[in-house]
Amino acid sequence: MEYRIKKYFFLALALLAVAGCRKKAQIEIPLGVNNTEIHLKSNAEGWCNIPVYSTVQWTAVLEPECSWAGISPTSGQGYTEIRFEYDANLEGSPRNIVLFVSGGGYERRILITQPAN
């Protein structure tokens, strides 16, 4: 009789352990982007989406400020896509801009280049 009780006790304990292991794993990414560089075409205006993954509030800014490019939204939390819009480069020199995404003590930077026409 004692053997049966121990057997059922260990069986119940094993079932509880297995049931407890079925918890979904969650990976916390405080702040992440999927690119560190983006290369644009020179002779066309356009846009691209830049994914941001975060568990913290973040803000985004372009440096230096310019008239040929813009971003939206400039803040968020969780998974968000920043839309980067740009004009064609009709000038004779290449241009560069940096997108800074920061929040929760973290900073990510993406160098965006556009060659001369």
Image: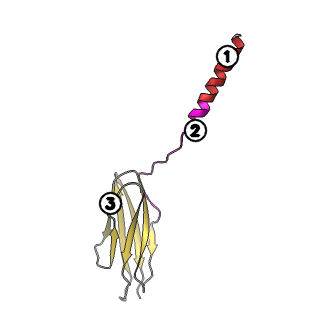
Q: Earlier in the sequence, mark 1 or mark 2?
A: 1
Q: Tell me if mark 2 has few (under 14), some (14-19) or many (20+) residues whose alpha carbon lies within 10 angstroms of its own.
A: few
Left or right of 62 in this view: 34: right
Residue 91 coordinates in the image, percent (x, y): 35, 88
Residue 31 coordinates in the image, percent (x, y): 41, 55
- Callout 2: helix, strand or loop? loop
Which quadrant would the N terminus be assigned to in this image? top right
Q: CA distance from mark 2 to mark 3?
A: 35 Å
| Image position of 63 with respect to 53: above or below | below
Label 3 belongs to which residue? 75
The part of the image, by quadrant, that contains residue 64 is bottom left
Mark number, residue 97? none
Q: Earlier in the sequence, mark 2 or mark 3?
A: 2
- Callout 3: helix, strand or loop? strand
Q: Tell me if mark 1 has few (under 14), some (14-19) or many (20+) residues whose alpha carbon lies within 10 angstroms of its own.
A: few
Q: CA distance from mark 1 to mark 2?
A: 25 Å
Label 2 belongs to which residue? 22
Name the residue at 36% across, 67% down: 99
Label 1 belongs to which residue? 6
* Amino acid at circle 1: Lys
Name the residue at 46% across, 66% down: 35
Q: Nearer the viewer, residue 81 or 34?
A: 81
* Amino acid at circle 3: Ser
Q: Furthest residue to the top?
A: 1
Please tell me whether mark 2 or mark 3 is closer to you in this view.
Answer: 2
Which quadrant would the C terminus be assigned to in this image? bottom left
Range of the magenta residues?
17-34
Whether 30 is among the magenta residues is yes
Q: Nearer the viewer, residue 91 or 15?
A: 15
